[in-house]
Amino acid sequence: MREDIHTKGIPVLCASCEARHRGICGALNPDQLLTLAKSTKRHKAETGKELVSDAGNVERFSNVLSGVVKLTKTLSDGRQQIVGLQFAPDFIGRPFQSESTLTAEAATDVELCSFPRKALERMMKEQPDLEHRLLEQKLRELDQARDWMVALGRKTAAEKIASFLLMIARNIDPTAGPEQRGACFDLPLSRAEIADFLGLTVETVSRQLTRLRGEKVIRIENNRHVIVDDIGRLTARSGD
Amino acid sequence: MREDIHTKGIPVLCASCEARHRGICGALNPDQLLTLAKSTKRHKAETGKELVSDAGNVERFSNVLSGVVKLTKTLSDGRQQIVGLQFAPDFIGRPFQSESTLTAEAATDVELCSFPRKALERMMKEQPDLEHRLLEQKLRELDQARDWMVALGRKTAAEKIASFLLMIARNIDPTAGPEQRGACFDLPLSRAEIADFLGLTVETVSRQLTRLRGEKVIRIENNRHVIVDDIGRLTARSGD
DNA sequence: CGATTATTTGATTTCGGTCAAAGTAAGTGG
DNA sequence: CCACTTACTTTGACCGAAATCAAATAATCG
């Protein structure tokens, strides 16, 4: 558990939680945390579990504590597009609208901390800083969505894959830092999911990964584990 | 000017402004409006004028009062992608970050109302409802961005064009309503810009429009004016 | 009216999709 | 522990939607 003089009065549930530091809960004082914690549940969901369903009513919001959640949209004939990936300590939910317009699904095994929509909306009124944090999170999501719009609309298959690997490296390489040469991580998505994220087919994703491996830009172990020796070589292939 | 018993004490500048009703300024009381209005400037910009430049410092935010603003991102080799279109009374700006990561440009002649970034951020602290409005606006932008991600990643050229026409109709047909059969409007974008919005080339955009015209789904006058007799036929081609 | 820019149309190419099959990994139950 | 199923990934052959290249036509503007 993180050493912290501010741990006094903090709910046990929250004491070691990243969302209290970098996530939205950081806006709350011990009393408010305590109040929210009363209606809070921590739970695990395994890969593939649907967390929020399209057109379903959403009565609870969550923080991602570990793992990766994918947000997808589906056309009437079944074509799918992943429109966002959420990592700890991201917030999952669409405030001020009870109907969801997308599906949230556990891409890996995940741990979540969830609370009633109403409880959060009530607390937002008494603690404006909570709304501020939420705004900052949503602004980040918007920036990311727009970055991917450029990739989807204007990048080649090869550039899409390179950009994707870089994004994953930035988000889940535990050793990540701004000035490092290499990276390694487990892909949180299957080939089919990567395809749905990048607007490609499984076959194209597979071929492009094989190509990067052939050019010694990446190494792949056990299908999911990726090692990048020189991030620069990947960046050079990302188009931007 | 709009008849309104609440017009008392409202700055002249704001009296007839849509942003005061549906935009972010609706969160402000007359006193606050007055304070903000002191550092507010109304101005016009003609088609093509760059309003916010990529990597430039942003010292002012704006409301769109009329016309259409396009938000674009450009790759190092010049490929471009439009990542958002803003209509009145949308807010333009990225709070909590002085560096812009995109370019905002007048797609048509526009009227704007701009104010210093600092003034808005100061006022957000004393009036949480302002931040609330901003959050709602940014949530809408995020929803829209994600809808376009689906179009960019998974729709065919024909579906992209149909979706685009529908979106424009919804936003600028003055007679627009939920239960109407037809629509007509002036396209706010050139063929090249539509291409940059949909991740296509000019030629493909042109061919798809010609095709829709051939199938009598739309009529086009003077290159820019579009008439849709039966919205349903367009919706049927939009993919979702 | 000529000059310039935007749009359309046509011919050809290409990147990524589709279809098909083989190779791999991960369980499952005997 | 190993046969067997099932799901995921890779590879190959071929195809097609949209890109590219090239020109003609239409609109706009000084």
Image (cartoon, coloured by chain):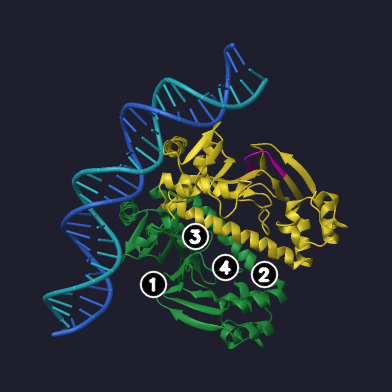
Chain colours: A green, B yellow, C blue, D cyan
**Of residues A178 and B19, which is closer to you in this image?**
B19
**Position of A61 compared to A172: left or right?**
right
| Depth order, front residue of B209/C13 | B209
Mark positioned earlier in the residue sequence (3 or 1): 1
What is the secondary structure assignment of the residue under circle 3?
Answer: loop
Q: Where B73 falls versus A32 (above or below)?
A: above
| Residue nearest the viewer, comparing A185 with B208 | B208
Q: Position of residue B119 (x, y in %)?
A: 78, 57
Residue placed at 70% from the left, 71% from the top?
A: A129
Mark 4, Cα crowd under 10 Å, few <14 / some 14-19 / many 20+, is: some
- Residue A131 is labelled as 2
Camera-nearest label, 2 or 3: 2
User: Dot 2 surroundings within 10 Å: few (below 14), some, or many (20 or more)?
Assistant: many
The location of residue A187, given as percent across then percent down, is 39, 65
Residue A180: which numbered mark, if any? 3
2 or 1: tag closer to the N-terminus: 1
- Identified by mark 2, the residue type is Glu
Do labels 2 and 3 touch, CB within 8 Å?
A: no
The region drawn magenta spans: B102-111
| Residue plotted at (52% across, 71% down) | A88
